[in-house]
Image (cartoon, rainbow, N blue to C red):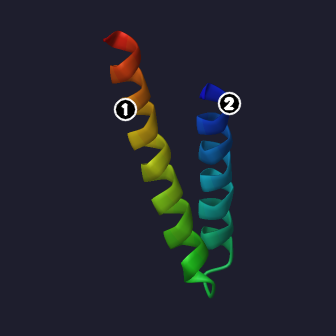
Amino acid sequence: MRALLIAVGVVALVLILLGIIIEAVQWLLIIGLVALVAAAVLGVVHARRAMQ
């Protein structure tokens, strides 16, 4: 599960950087931000389940 979260986070960061570099392709920035938020939420949910 940790590897999946790291992979999603890395992909999100790459998409955000590509979105910043290529300003005309704004959907890459949006997808990257959504993926980053999803990775954070999955991490929090997984951490809470592990604590219980």
Residue lying furthest bottom: 24
30 left or right of 25 in image: left
Residue lying furthest top: 51
The answer to whether residue 28 is above or below residue 24 is above
4 left or right of 51 in image: right
- Measured Cα–Cα span from mark 2 to mark 1: 15 Å
Q: Quadrant of the N terminus?
A: top right
Q: Position of residue 42 (x, y in %)?
A: 44, 39
- Could you tell me the amino acid type at mark 2? Ala
Q: Position of residue 32 (x, y in %)?
A: 56, 62
The answer to whether residue 28 is above or below residue 52 is below
Disc assigned to residue 3: 2
Residues at discs 2 and 1 in contact (Cβ within 8 Å): no
The answer to whether residue 11 is above or below residue 23 is above
Q: Nearer the viewer, residue 52 or 20?
A: 52
Q: Quadrant location of residue 6?
A: top right
The answer to whether residue 12 is above or below residue 40 is below
Task: Tell me the crowding category of disc 1: few under 14, some 14 to 19, or many 20 or more residues within 10 angstroms, Cα based.
Answer: few
Question: Residue at the spot x=65%, y=62% of the render?
Answer: 15
Q: Position of residue 38 (x, y in %)?
A: 45, 50
- Could you tell me the amino acid type at mark 1? Val
42 left or right of 31 in image: left
Badge 2 marks a residue whose secondary structure is helix
Badge 1 marks a residue whose secondary structure is helix
Question: Residue at the spot x=60%, y=54% of the render?
Answer: 12
Mark 1 sits on what residue? 45
Disc assigned to residue 18: none
Q: Position of residue 2 (x, y in %)?
A: 61, 27
Task: Tell me the crowding category of disc 2: few under 14, some 14 to 19, or many 20 or more residues within 10 angstroms, Cα based.
Answer: few
